[in-house]
Amino acid sequence: MTGQHPDERDETRLTFDIFRSIDRLRLSTWLTVVLERLWPLLLPLLLVIAIFLCLSWFGIFRMIPDLVRFAVLGLFALSLPACLYLLSKFRLPGHTEISRRLESVNTLDHQPITVQSEELATNANDPFAQALWNEHRKRMAERLRDLKSGLPQTRIPERDPWALRAVVGLLFVVAFAFSGGPLGGRISDAFRSHSGSNVVPPRIDAWVTPPRYTGRAPLFLTSAANAEEKQFTVPQDSTLIIRIIGGSGSEKVTLTSIDGKAANIEAKDQGKADDAAAAKSKPRNFEILLGANSTVALSGDGTANSAWSFSVIPDQPPSIRFTKDPSSAANRTMEVSYALKDDYGAVSALAKIEQAVVSGKDARPLYNAPDLPLSLPRRGEQPREMKTTKDLTEHPWAGSEVRMTLAATDDAKQEARSETKTLVMPERPFANPLARAVVEQRRVLALNANAKPDVLNTLDAITIWPEETIKNASHYLALRSVRSRLNLARSDDQLRDVVAYMWQVARGIEDGALSDAERRLRQAQEALKQAIERGASQEEIEKRMAELRSAMNEYLREFAEKAQKSPNMAQAPNPNMMELRQEDIDRMLDRIEDLAKQGSKDQAQQLLSELENMLNNLQMGQNQQGQNGQQGQMRQQMDKLGDLMRRQKQMMNETHRLEQQRQNGMQQDYGQNEQGQQGNQGQMSEEDIAKALRGLQEGQDKLQSDLEQMMKDLRGLGINPGKDFGEAGKSMGEAGKSLGEADGGQALDQQGNALDALRRGGQDMMKQWQQAMGQDGQTGPGGQQQNGRRDPLGRPQRGPEGLAPEPGNMLPGEIDIQRARQILDEIRRRLGNALSPQIEKDYLERLLKFD
């Protein structure tokens, strides 16, 4: 190369670049020719495959009979060898064919590309011929510039002028999209038999039904809102139901537990059909009880359709406990206070009673333990203290020592028990010794039927000298009747009849017909309570209310007759006891009837419970004579305190009025000075206001002296006035000085302090009096609560002014109900006024939504 001429080197480099460019063109042209030859041979095979996939994805194979399906598959099977035979004709292009293709595409004459690769066949050793050949090749190479490989020419349009291949391609794309839908087919449908029937695409519905006691709505898994969700939280013992309509009938439901164990679920109520087609047309239901965390999968034809995971909320067991020790009311009915809690609400609760001391190994009791079902809170209600009362004084176990345990059961059959309390069952007290003896022998016989001879001997001993011990001949005859019946009794049922008869005899000896009236009243109350509980009709409610009114009137009449005969009624009445009037009871009964008819079951039951408590706390005026005088004096001091607080409030209001007028006068004087006006007609001057404030000093000092006198009287009753009354007197004195100096603002603050101190002192005084009387929140004589004055419903009344009643009954009174109705009527009237502004109407509508 170094010995060559420069022109020769340039020619050599040019020739090298031309040949390198030709080699690249040859590769591109080779690929083009291969595509031209291969595509026409490959296209038939691709079209056959595309048509097969279209038929499969459109579900054609699933809908046509098996005979037609076999014929179509046979056509495809025959077309495949023909397509493969066409492919066998494919051959690769040679070097010369590539050169000719380049010369043809670029319209080159005299084969300039072919010349570059050819050699002289003759006279190869002739220098002149070789030089001439080289010159020819050089001149041909100069034409090889800007060559093109050209585009493939498959000539498919000439073979398919109607472009049917495009139709097949469009169907292929649509079929692919259709295959993802619920009606889309699968490739496997072409190779599976469908028993000559048209297969209906399956419709799948799945939902979870929680237990009814949970109060939760069903959860639809296949709805549009939950279609994308796969994880759900459900209560324990919920039921999963999967319903499949249509399909091939080969669908399977698999339950996988949290530990990985899988189990197939069989369809329920599928029944038997004459043929497979009829079996597929019937709905197939799969039911699964979800007791723990698990996963449920639905599959069909070997593919998975759906899968859901469930997180199960365990059903917590209930809890029940005593909030107070079991006690008895004034009429000796059993009172049980307790707290019951459950996540979905308990279905039942009762107090289980058993004997604390067994009579003996050979004892044969005639009666089982008494039943004491407990009231249940409403479902969804916040836990609160509950109370159940029941009259057990007629039960033969009354008066014996028993053990009581509370038990609660929820809908999941889970049971909870409380601690065990030992108590003596309340019994009716009998003042008559003869009645007490009969009741005692009744209890002995009821607890042990083998004690019959002993009871007979005791009855003989009681009636051995009736002239001196039994003044009433009817009582003697009743006892002899008891003795005869007991002597003739042989079976346990006959003995139980004797026990019931002995109770009637004891009641007749004690108080005659009053117990019959009380029994009728209790039966009427229980019948009304059951009618309200089951949502009885208005006619039945009216009937039960009529029975209750009649029984109530008879009971009160008998009670009043016996109270008049009691010698204790001649004593001074207890000021803490309220008078029970007929109109109070009638108004309460009318309210219960209205609530029951309106469907307010809970409120009616609560008000009926209030009525029972009122009757339980009903007592005759048999208070101790020694306490009456002190209670009257204490009441006088309470009235004095109320009068002091009322006068102090009036004094405070008058001071505030004068001080407010002074402030208004100062503002008006300032405004008049700004406007150049003079005169202040109709307003008190500063001097007049100061004089009026000084005039209040005398009244304030009188309040202080009256408070000191009341404190002395309290000390005489053994009540320590306490520091609150001392602070009240000090504030009153300072308020009097401020009034003397005409300082109304300072006097207002001191009067307010005095009023607050009087309220605190009054509460402390009431507390000390209750402690001195041994009442302090405990039950007094007879089992009645002695927490101050109460109305006929057992609710504490308001004491002196400013002393709020104790929290208790929260039922609205008649005045509150009427006031609420007036407010609602006024709101509706304002809404109907067309001139009311829209913003006011919107506000009133929001108020009505809280109703």
Image (spheres, rainbow, N blue to C red):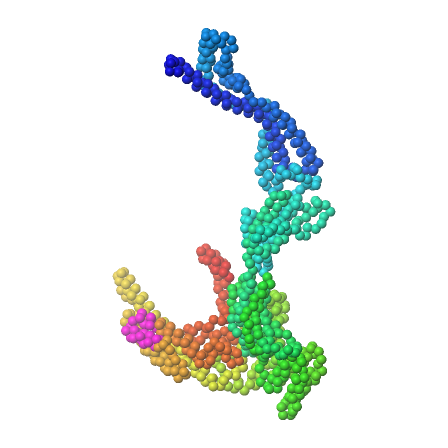
**Does the magenta-highlighted stretch encompass residue 748?**
yes
Q: Which residue is drawn at 66% across and 46% down?
A: 249
Residue interval drawn in magenta: 727-751
Q: In this view, does 806 lie to the left or right of 674?
A: right
In this rendering, the answer to whether 335 lies above or below 316 is below
Residue toward you, 785 or 609 = 785
Query: How many numbered marks, from 0 up?
Result: 0
Q: Residue at x 55, y 24 (%)?
A: 34
Q: Residue at x 54, y 76 (%)?
A: 327
Between 409 and 428, the one nearer to me in the picture: 409
Examine the image and state in which quarter residue 676 appears.
bottom left
Q: In which quadrant will I find the N terminus?
A: top left
Q: Let me know if residue 835 appears in the view.
A: no
- Is residue 67 found left or right of 259 in the rendered image? right
Q: Position of residue 97 (x, y in %)?
A: 54, 18
Q: Is residue 640 visible?
A: yes
State whether residue 651 is above or below residue 199.
below
Tell whether position 455 is magenta: no
Q: Which of 76 and 13 is in front in this view?
A: 13
Residue drawn at point x = 30 percent, y = 64 percent: 667
Report the predominant secondary structure element of the magenta stretch.
Answer: helix
Query: On screen, 574 above or below 195?
Result: below
In the rendered image, residue 96, in percent from the top left (x then y), is placed at 53, 17
Q: Where is residue 347 in the image (x, y as percent from the top left)?
A: 59, 64
Quarter of the figure with residue 467: bottom right
Residue 367 is situated, as x and y percent measured from the top left of the image, at: 64, 76
